[in-house]
Structure formats: structure tokens, C-alpha cells
Image (cartoon, rainbow, N blue to C red):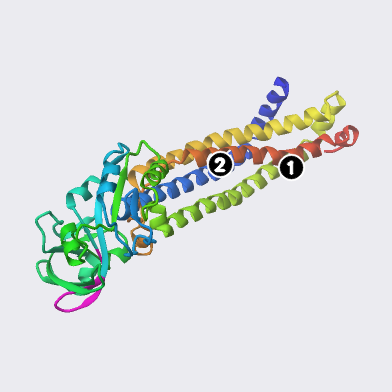
Amino acid sequence: MKLLLKLAFRNILRHKKRSFITIAAIAVGLGALIFMRSFMHGAHLQMVQNVTRTLTSDAQIVPEALENFYNTNGAIEDPEPIRQILRSDPRVVAFSERIIGGGMVASEKKSMATFIIGFDPEQEEKIDTRREVILGRALTGADEQGVILGEKMRQTLEAEIGEPIILTAQDFYGSLTGEVFTLIGTFQTGNDQLDNSMGILLKTTAQRLLSFEHRVSKFALKIDPRYSTEDVVQDLREKIGNSGLKVVTWKSLIPMIAQMIQFQNGMSFIIMAIVLSVVAVGILNTLMMSIVERIREFGLMMALGTKPSQIIQMIVFESFLLSILGALGGLLLGFGLAFYFGHVGINLTRFVSALSNLMIGSHVFPSFDLYYSMIFLVVVLVSNLVVSFYPAWKAGRLAPLESMRQI
């Protein structure tokens, strides 16, 4: 075994240029896969972070009738028992009560449909909600008649900070209601649909406008990151029981983002198959060329008593050594690129408008994905090992006398 390994290593060094090209091909292929996955992983983390911090939070307690984030059906008639359940669970770091509704918003010049959301700024801050203030200022507890709009909505309405804004909506009982508010600021979430449709009020103001009285539309929850969100959600479902409410994660509220992440995860394996096929063909070509050049050598070895099985083992060892060296180089290359761009980011400014609805900002910071990287590494090693068996088998079948006649 040691002798065969020694011979395999010697044969790799004997053809340095060809071996280097093969090792480089494996390294570049694996490195590209790892970096591509790191980019996707970083984009996914950013998407989830933006969704949970600007829209949904980690989980929500909502009426059964509510189907997604934009749906305004139903209300929680008695929120106090829910408050007690959430306060008694140490895994729930904080929660925010929200009021949602639909209506029309009008400036002195234009009007358009709007998605109204009301909350307590102090509660919202505790669940780590982040909406970038573009103009004016954020909402405070003293702004009973204040409203902040998405910046794109403000531009569409041609409204300025300090100007009156009229909100009209259908209240809880189906009656038409409306009030005049003052535009105190604008925000930006990075999602064009929200930035051009959402208006924010205080929770108490929204309750008054929509005749919600003591009711709330939903509870937005922040879960301690040390615990599994899915486990906490399942436990809360059992505690709440059959009360006409349901506990959901962001995946249920914004299914498009969850489906996009799932689709891109599947694409990772398709791209892996394509890249590894190219690398495997390169390995096969290298080994076949090596065998053609060494036919006479193999014939001499077998004439001196080397068994065909030992010839096969030696060639498989050569392939495995090339794969190991290439894989190590690929890991270093992929991790190095992920580490560097994870700090400086990749500028996607020219694509930001196309990516805005996916909740991806102007810069993506790749994040090394150990799980997928190990999968790529194992598949590279196994596939190259499997590919090496064919040329090794061909070499093992050579007839010693005929092989020694080859030049």
C-alpha cells in the first residue's frame, strides 16, 4: 500500500504541468461552488433579516382568517390572554401589538390606495423593527395626528413634510371613516410595493380611526435566537389552543421569499452537478492521457509481477491525491473569497430596483455556508474517485507483452 501511494505521488510529480492544471481545475470548480453558495447564503440571510426586521418579525399571532402579511381580515377580540401567555414565555423576548387596515390616502394633489398599520413605537423598537427614515422624523408616542408614509408613496402623492394628509378607510363595522393627519416623515424598507403603499399611525390612533376599540389585528413576536423559532411557535399554538387564532412564522406571511430561497437552494445542486461534471471530465481526460503515455510502463510492471489490481489501486490513488490537493485549494479559495467579500460586500446598485421586492439591498455580504461546503467537498472527492475507476480498469486489463511493444 505504501509503495503504491509512493508511486502514485511520484507519477503526479513527474508530470507537474498536467497535474497542476488538473489540481487547479478542481480548486477553481470547488472554490466557485463554495463562493456561489456563500453569496446565496448571504443574500438569503439578508432577505430573512429584512423581512423580519421591517415587516413580519420572527413570528406572529393572527386571526385564523388572515392569510398573509397584506391581508386585513379579522381581529383579536380579547388580546389580554395572549399578552399573559407571551409575558410568561421567556423565549419571547418582546412583542408588538399591531392594527392593520386598508383605505385611501390623499394629499392636496393626488390620492391612492394605502395599507394602514398602527403600532406602539416603544413596543416596535423592542422587537428590533428597522425602517430607514428618509425625510422628517420617526413616529413617537405624542404624534396622535401624525402619519409617516413610504418615500415612494410621498413622491407619488407629491406631498411634503408638514402638509395635511387625509386617510379614509372602512372601519371594523363596515362604515366609511376618515381623518386629517400631518405628514411628519417618510421611511424606506427596500421593498417597492411597501414603500409605495404603506402608511403608519400610532396604535391608539389606528384603533380610533378603524373603530377597533380594545381589539388588535396581530401580535408581532421577537424570539430569543438561542431557541428554534419553529419550536416556540409550536408551543404557543398548543397554549393558545382553538381560540380562532393561529401562530405563524414569516414564511407563512411572506411565502414568496420562502419559495425563492427554496428555489435557489435547489439551483445550488443543479449548478453543482454542472460544475462537477466539467471537473470530472477533466480528471478522466488527465488519467486517460496518463495511461496512454504509460502503457509500456504498465506492461513492464506487470511483467515483473505487479498484479492488475495493484495497477488499478495506483491509478485510483493518483486520482484521489489530485482530488485531495484540488479540494484543499478549493476550500481555501472559496473561504478566502467569502471572507473577503463578506467584509467589503458585493455592490448590486445597478440591480437594486429589480431586487427590491426580494428584500435585497444594494450590497450583499457573502456568508460562508459550512453545511453546503462540506456537501460540495464530499461530492467532489467521491465523483472524482468514481470517475477514476474506468481508466484504472482499462489499465488493469492491458496485456503485458502487447503493452511492452508500445512506444
The secondary structure type at the circle numbered 1 is helix
Magenta includes 35? no
Q: Is residue 86 left or right of residue 207?
A: right
Q: Amino acid at mark 1?
A: Met
Farthest-out residue, top: 2
Q: Amino acid at mark 2?
A: Phe
Farthest-out residue, right: 401
Residue appearing at x 44%, y 50% in the figure: 40
Res. 388 visible in picture:
yes
Q: Which residue is mark 1?
A: 288
Q: Residue 76, located in which quarter of the rendered image?
A: bottom left
Q: Earlier in the sequence, mark 1 or mark 2?
A: 1
Front in this rendered view, residue 140 or 370: 140
The secondary structure type at the circle numbered 2 is helix
Residue extent of the magenta highlight: 103-116
Q: Give the x, y percent position of residue 233.
A: 39, 45
Magenta includes 110? yes
Q: Give the x, y percent position of residue 168.
A: 20, 73
In this rendering, the answer to whether 372 lies above or below 115 is above
Q: Which residue is mark 2?
A: 376
Q: Residue 232, located in which quarter of the rendered image?
A: top left
Q: Residue 348, located in which quarter of the rendered image?
A: bottom left
In this rendering, the answer to whether 152 lies above or below 285 is below
